[in-house]
């Protein structure tokens, strides 16, 4: 029988990228194959992100485009909206876009087979809405992941109990949940058995992962990384995203002791002002944050540090903003992501007084991004002349060029034979821009 076609469009964070490939793992055995062309899809899933207004708006404009594609196909297309917008605005999507067949949140992906079956049976044309936080854990009901390429994500933790006052994630992903050590080790072994060399552990608060060990004792992420490092053919380990007050000494030490743990840490601070951090309910100070980086540099002097910043949070004064710039100068980030504050419906910060106007937000963002760019350029310039191990993962824009990641997470381009694809190679860095490096093969 001819296979049906599945197309998933993914927005948002790495967790969504992971979830999309888990959804493929669930749907493919039902008689589907993946298509790159959304117009010919029998099942089209939008995996959405709700983090900022712009991200959410994309969903509704995309749905307009998709409606047309569905009509062009004679209506014979199941449209599904998954992810964080689905969780937050499920009913609204159903109301505004009645041609959508299924809307379901991140905790119900394991129920896709029954949701698809239900949709196919529906003769009244009413959609299937599933935004529950079910009792059972979806991870226990998912097939083993398909493996593509040499670098893979592995979700070890999901959800957030931190409730930063600007953020929707605690509402869209639900409470923090850690997968068991055994489940993680099994998935990692399966990935490595299928050729994976680099695993990135994922979680909204990944460094607060705590599993139960062999003897019922709780373990922390540092201990988990030690175990993973024992998997022989696994070459590189990363984890993202971390929360400052959950950086345990074990995890900091792991950066000094475990060679397979890459010298890179993404640790968002959001603001350089303690007043704003408090208003954000961040539960750490600027000084505590800087101390973590100092401890890390003590055990691993070359570690690349990364972070996230929000500018224009309600009540942010010029001085608060200057303090944020001060953090960028002090840390010397290898990379950092910065955003203007976006008021999200239902979050406490959205109704705070003293909202900062859009023009000031935009100006501050541009100044901050300039400072971050300079920091990135300096970090990258310091690598020129050094030899780095790089995992070649894709073809570059130029002919004969492959692109991989350095231990520090930058993209490294190199003119080389295609046979080096999917290999770990040593590249001598010959030039650097703020976003990437160029290397030469060292034989
Ligand atoms: N701990 C999470 C953070 C997810 S959100 C994780 O696993 O990645 C990623 C970043 O988006 C945050 O660190 C923050 O800098 C930014 N962000 C979150 N809510 C925002 C909002 N309302 N406006 C602007 N930026 C926001
Ligand atoms: Fe959002 Fe804060 Fe949780 Fe990160 S820690 S997901 S920013 S609430
Ligand atoms: Fe977006 Fe949800 Fe990730 S809101 S950033 S897709 S957790």
Image: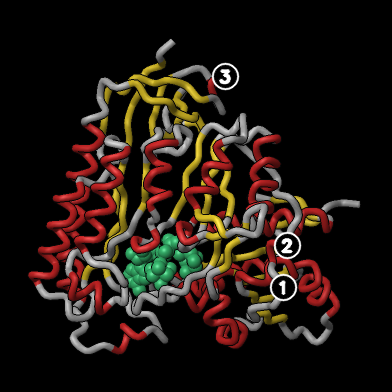
Q: Mark 1 points at which residue?
A: 136
Circle 2: is it few (<14), some (14-19), or many (20+) Cα within 10 Å? few
Quarter location, residue 277:
bottom left
Where's residue 228, x and y in %? 58, 41
Q: Which of marks 3 and 2 is nearer the N terminus?
A: 2
Q: In this rendering, would 34 be left or right of 390?
A: right
Q: Is residue 229 visible?
A: yes
Pointers 1 and 2 in contact (C-beta within 8 Å)? yes
Count of numbered labels shown in the rendering:
3
What residue appears at the point 72 percent right and 66 percent down from the top-left corner?
110
Q: Mark 2 points at which residue?
A: 140
What residue appears at the point 53 percent right and 42 percent down from the top-left corner?
226
- The correct choice, above or below, for 60 with respect to 229 in the image is below
Could you give the CA–CA distance between mark 1 and mark 2, rounded to whole angstroms? 8 Å
Q: Can residue 49 be seen in this view?
A: no
Queried on whether the Cβ of the residue with tag 2 lies below 8 angstroms from ligand 3, the answer reads: no
Q: Mark 3 points at which residue?
A: 419
Q: In this rendering, would 269 be left or right of 2?
A: left
Observer-side mark, 3 or 2, equals 2
What residue appears at the point 36 percent right and 37 percent down from the top-left corner?
408
* Nearer-the-camera pick, 257 or 64: 257
Pointers 3 and 1 in contact (C-beta within 8 Å)? no
């Amino acid at each position: 029988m001819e296979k049906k076609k599945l197309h998933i469009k993914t927005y948002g964070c790495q967790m969504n990228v992971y979830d999309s490939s888990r959804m493929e793992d669930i749907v493919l055995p039902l008689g589907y194959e993946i298509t790159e062309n959304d117009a010919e899809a029998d099942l089209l899933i939008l995996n959405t992100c709700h983090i900022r207004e712009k991200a959410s708006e994309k969903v509704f404009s995309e749905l307009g485009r998709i409606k047309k594609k569905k009509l062009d196909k004679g209506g014979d297309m199941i449209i599904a909206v998954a992810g964080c917008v689905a969780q937050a605005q499920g009913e609204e999507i159903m109301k505004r876009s009645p041609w959508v067949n299924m809307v379901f949140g991140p905790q119900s992906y394991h129920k896709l087979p029954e949701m698809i079956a239900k949709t196919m049976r529906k003769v009244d044309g009413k959609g299937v809405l599933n935004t529950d936080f079910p009792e059972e854990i979806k991870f226990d009901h998912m097939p083993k992941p398909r493996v593509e390429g040499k670098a893979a994500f592995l979700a070890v933790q999901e959800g957030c109990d931190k409730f930063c006052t600007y953020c929707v994630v605690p509402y869209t992903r639900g409470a923090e949940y850690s997968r068991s050590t055994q489940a993680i080790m099994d998935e990692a072994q399966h990935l490595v058995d299928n050729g994976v060399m680099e695993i990135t552990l994922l979680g909204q608060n990944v460094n607060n992962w705590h599993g139960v060990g062999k003897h019922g004792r709780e373990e922390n992420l540092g201990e988990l990384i030690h175990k993973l490092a024992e998997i022989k053919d696994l070459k590189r380990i990363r984890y993202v995203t971390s929360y400052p007050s959950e950086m345990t000494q074990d995890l900091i030490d792991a950066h000094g002791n475990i060679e397979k743990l890459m010298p890179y840490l993404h640790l968002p601070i959001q603001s350089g002002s303690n007043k704003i951090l408090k208003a954000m309910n961040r539960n750490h100070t600027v000084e505590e944050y800087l101390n973590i980086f100092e401890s890390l540099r003590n055990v691993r002097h070359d570690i690349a540090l990364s972070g996230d910043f929000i500018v224009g949070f309600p009540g942010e004064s010029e001085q608060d903003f200057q303090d944020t710039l001060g953090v960028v100068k002090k840390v010397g980030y290898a990379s950092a992501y910065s955003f203007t504050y976006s008021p999200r419906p239902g979050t406490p910060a959205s109704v705070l007084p003293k909202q900062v106007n859009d023009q000031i937000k935009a100006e501050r963002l541009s100044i901050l991004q300039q400072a971050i760019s300079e920091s990135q350029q300096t970090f990258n310039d310091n690598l020129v002349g050094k030899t780095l191990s790089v995992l070649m993962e894709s073809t570059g824009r130029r002919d004969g060029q492959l692109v991989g990641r350095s231990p520090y997470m930058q993209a490294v381009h190199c003119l080389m034979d295609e046979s080096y694809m999917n290999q770990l190679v040593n590249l001598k860095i010959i030039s650097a821009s703020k976003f990437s490096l160029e290397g030469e093969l060292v034989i």
